[in-house]
Amino acid sequence: KETVLEFSKNPNIEVISFTGGEIFLNYKFLEELLIITKSYNKKVTLISNGFWGSSRKSLKKYFSDFKKYNVIALTISYDEYHAPFVKLESIKNIFKFRMKYPEIDVSLNMAVTKDKMSNTILSELGSSVIGVKITKFPIITVGAAKDKISKNNIHNFYNIEKDRDVLY
């Protein structure tokens, strides 16, 4: 809370973004943070895996709160790596419900590898993704991906040694 308050008081900061783990797991805490940012008239962006899209009650409350607390953007992280844990229907529900709130920019981020491009997911989301900004980005071999994903499956656009200036 102290960090959010410090950032909210800073006149040079216009937008504050909440993510990490899954910020919606403790919505009461997130709402406390949103109250702080709202009191300083900050704009807010949120990043989530969208698990809460399965609940009509949550959809209504959260989107209503987004409007109330100056949330300007919601990014959903969902791909073949999230699919075993979050139902596709939850994501589809969010994308459909967001149409009632055109002032909130909703986007979809998808981590991909050569063998998991999430094209079936996009197909199954169907027309719910019309107007949703979709970004596919290559998984980087750090953390769990370093041990669990073959280097042959990684899209290599940069060589960290050769393209250092591009990365820094």
Image (tube, grey):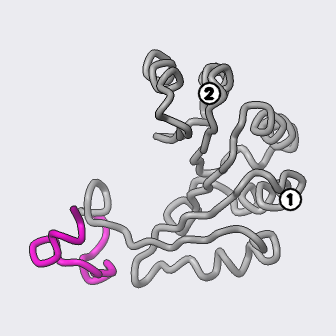
Q: Is residue 112 left or right of residue 64?
A: left
Q: Is residue 165 left or right of residue 78?
A: left
Q: Quadrant of the C terminus?
A: bottom left
Kind of residue at badge 1:
Met
Q: Considering depth in this image, is 36 or 31 the residue closer to the camera?
A: 36
**Image quadrant in which you'd find residue 97:** bottom right
Q: Residues within 10 Å of mark 2 (few under 14, many from 20)?
A: some
Q: Is residue 139 magenta?
A: no
Kind of residue at badge 2:
Leu
Above or below, 17 against 146 in this view is above
Residue occupying the far right of the picture:
100
Secondary structure of the residue carrying numbered label 2: helix
Secondary structure of the residue carrying numbered label 1: helix
The residue depicted at 59 percent of the width and 51 percent of the height is 49
Point out residue 132 in the picture as x, y percentages from the top left corner.
71, 68
Which one is earlier in the sequence, the residue at label 2 or at label 1?
Answer: 2
Point out residue 76 in the picture as x, y percentages from the top left corner.
62, 56
Residue occupying the far front of the picture:
11
| Alpha-carbon span between mark 2 and mark 1 | 23 Å
Q: Can you tell which mark lies on residue 99?
A: 1
Point out residue 38 in the picture as x, y percentages from the top left corner.
68, 25
Label 2 sits on residue: 30
What span is colored magenta in the figure? Answer: 147-168
